[in-house]
Amino acid sequence: MGLSLEGKTCLVTGGSRGIGRAIAIKLAELGADVAITYARSAEAANEVKAEIEAKGRKAKAIQADAVDFGEAEKVINEIVTDWDKIDVLVNNAGIAKDNLILRMSEEQWDDVITTNLKSIFNYSKASARPMMKNRGGSIINISSVVGISGNAGQSNYSASKAGIIGFTKSYAKELASRNIRANVIAPGYITTDMTGSLDEKVLEGIKEATPLGRAGNPDEIANAVAFLASDMSSYITGETIRVDGGMAM
């Protein structure tokens, strides 16, 4: 048994850039047909779609509001209608609006909690019946090490990412008897467009707090996702795998 995704159909939410983009391309490299959702940038999403197709795989780029359950159902239905099934769901869509609690607005709190948690619920629920019909599936939810350790200035983000871990364990217990697995990847500091604007002193502090002494890259998250998407992880469910260079050790 090797790390192959031949014959599998996958959905990556928030797949037009950063970690989501790397995940989508990695799954295609391993033989999967891959759909992505995106919120705004059709150009970036279509670039990912073209890269997937260039690898000889089927691809979709679907614009959808992650917090709208009806849109999540439409996305899943389109995939199942056109590709017959969905084998792998990667819940990657999320936002951050950092601030100290004393300065955080109610809107900042609500936006992050709603986007980061409800999107997980929406797509996990919408994909459950197709996966049950297919007698199996793998759901991979992208959390963060701050959901484990917390972080000053990120109470909303940390709470949402901790919630993802609790949700995943519950979901894994509910659907294990149907051969549907659910696991979490908890990245540490990963270099992306979103993190590229951080102050150099902040970056140095992060590196010093990371035993491996460096930031991670999106491909390192994608590799872990690919493992959980594959049959090589067929006896793993309800787990949280930290990909953080030892930051939360």
Image (cartoon, grey):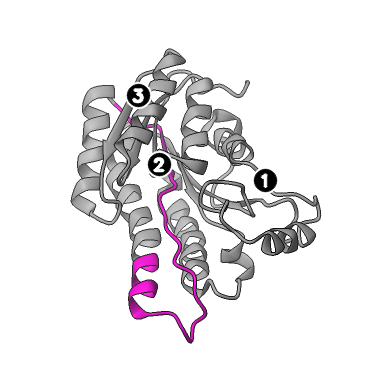
Residue at mark 2 = 178
Mark 2 → mark 1, Cα distance in angstroms = 35 Å
Q: Is residue 110 magenta?
A: yes
- Nearest the eye: 85 or 214: 214
Q: Which of pointers 1 and 3 indicates the residue nearer the eye?
A: 1
- Nearest the eye: 175 or 197: 197
Counting other residues with Cα less than 10 Å from the Cα at mark 3, is it few (<14), some (14-19), or many (20 or more)? Answer: many
* Label 1 SS: loop
Q: Give residue 132's quadrant in the image.
A: top left
Q: Earlier in the sequence, mark 3 or mark 2?
A: 3
* Label 3 SS: strand
Q: Which of pointers 3 and 2 indicates the residue nearer the eye?
A: 3
Image vertical order of residue 128 relative to residue 35, above or below: below
Magenta stretch, residue numbers: 85-113
Q: Looking at the picture, which amino acid does disc 3 mark?
A: Ala
- Nearest the eye: 105 or 221: 105
Q: Is residue 104 magenta?
A: yes
Which quadrant is the N terminus positioned in? Answer: top right
Counting other residues with Cα less than 10 Å from the Cα at mark 1, is it few (<14), some (14-19), or many (20 or more)? Answer: many
- Tell me, for residue 59, which label it has, or none: 3
Q: Looking at the picture, which amino acid does disc 2 mark?
A: Arg
Q: Residue at x 40, y 41 (%)?
A: 178
- The answer to whether 172 appears left or right of 231 in the picture is left
Residue at mark 1 = 216
Mark 3 → mark 2, Cα distance in angstroms = 27 Å
* Label 2 SS: helix
